[in-house]
Amino acid sequence: MPTAAPRALITRPEPEASQWVQALQARGIAATALPLICIAGAPDAQALAHARQSLGNYDAMMVVSGSAARHFFDSNVALALIQQTNAAIKTRVWAPGPGTAAMLQALGVPTRRIDQPAADAGQFDSESLWRSVGASVQPGHRVLIVRGSEAGSDGAGSGRDWLSSQIRAAGGSVDFVVAYTRAAPPWSPEQRALAQVAATDGTLWVLSSAQALGHLCAALPDQSWAGARALTTHPRIAQAALAAGFGQVLECRPALADVAASIESAP
């Protein structure tokens, strides 16, 4: 009898979730999109516009994700700024991994201006990025970190505190700007039913964010995850999945190729 295609739920925000599903289905994986994070625009459009206009004042900017890249460089003003950067401004653009780097390239940021972790890095995260860029940070350097904020928060944003500490320890200074907000997506009855079935039928939940996992547990507060399987893209997410009660938790790097290979080889 033919072997059944491995089943996976892709929980990334849209449009990445649907793009990943299409790529995984092309490999014979029965992938379905079930986003656990909804992305919206910046809570303070004026602050974001000011950061765009001031980019030339920074030695580097760190874009925490593809969503951050898309919302920072998604306007005609930002495209014009990129063109100006090509000609005059020497700001480096830091990406925590190849997915974010690919998004930056698609938005027009020159490849030669992008810094990211080594291709063979064990993980794609702030720690791996720092190993690539840390030596370039000198006293007096200014770095802008473009990140997201949880909907309903004070809009200050969160995350990347470790990286900012390293920059300051090297003598640099750090500013932050919030380019987008994250929230739990509204589910249709069909999506809720899909999640409940996937908690027990052997489907592999592909989790790329501890925050997404939190949204899942909040949406189904009475659900037991003892029979659920998770493929996580960072050790911290793996720890969160274990704490949530997932019965089987696997880990891999967050690149699409690594995720696909891990789904195909999962026991």
Image (tube, rainbow, N blue to C red):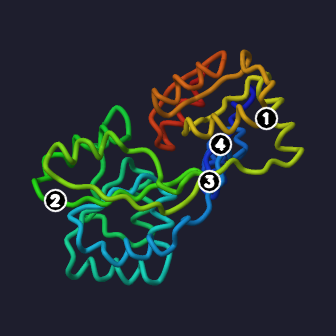
Q: Quadrant of residue 19?
A: bottom right
Q: Secondary structure at mark 4?
A: loop
Q: Are marks 3 and 1 in contact (CB under 8 Å)?
A: no
Choose between 248 and 37: the one closer to the eye: 37
Q: Which mark is residue 151?
A: 3
Q: Which circle, 1 or 2, is nearer the viewer?
A: 2
The residue that mark 4 highlights is 11
- The amino acid sitting under disc 3 is Ala
Q: Secondary structure at mark 1?
A: helix
Q: Quadrant of residue 94?
A: bottom left
The residue that mark 1 highlights is 195
Please tell me whether residue 119 is drawn above or below residue 88 in the rendered image.
above
Q: Which circle, 4 or 2, is nearer the viewer?
A: 2
Is the C terminus in the top left, top right, bottom left or bottom right quadrant?
Answer: top right
Label 2 crowd (10 A; few <14 / some 14-19 / many >=20): some
Label 1 crowd (10 A; few <14 / some 14-19 / many >=20): many
260 to the left or right of 194: left
Q: Earlier in the sequence, mark 4 or mark 2?
A: 4
Q: Residue at x 39, y 57 (%)?
A: 63
Q: Locate residue 142, reporting x and y percent.
A: 21, 61
Q: Earlier in the sequence, mark 3 or mark 2?
A: 2
Choose between 73 and 113: the one closer to the eye: 73
Q: Locate residue 259, reporting x and y percent.
A: 53, 36
Q: Which mark is residue 141?
A: 2
- State the separation of the CA atoms marked 3 and 1: 23 Å
Q: Locate residue 247, reporting x and y percent.
A: 66, 15
Q: Earlier in the sequence, mark 1 or mark 2?
A: 2
Q: Secondary structure at mark 2?
A: loop
- State the separation of the CA atoms marked 4 and 1: 11 Å
- The amino acid sitting under disc 1 is Ala
Q: Residue at x 31, y 36 (%)?
A: 121
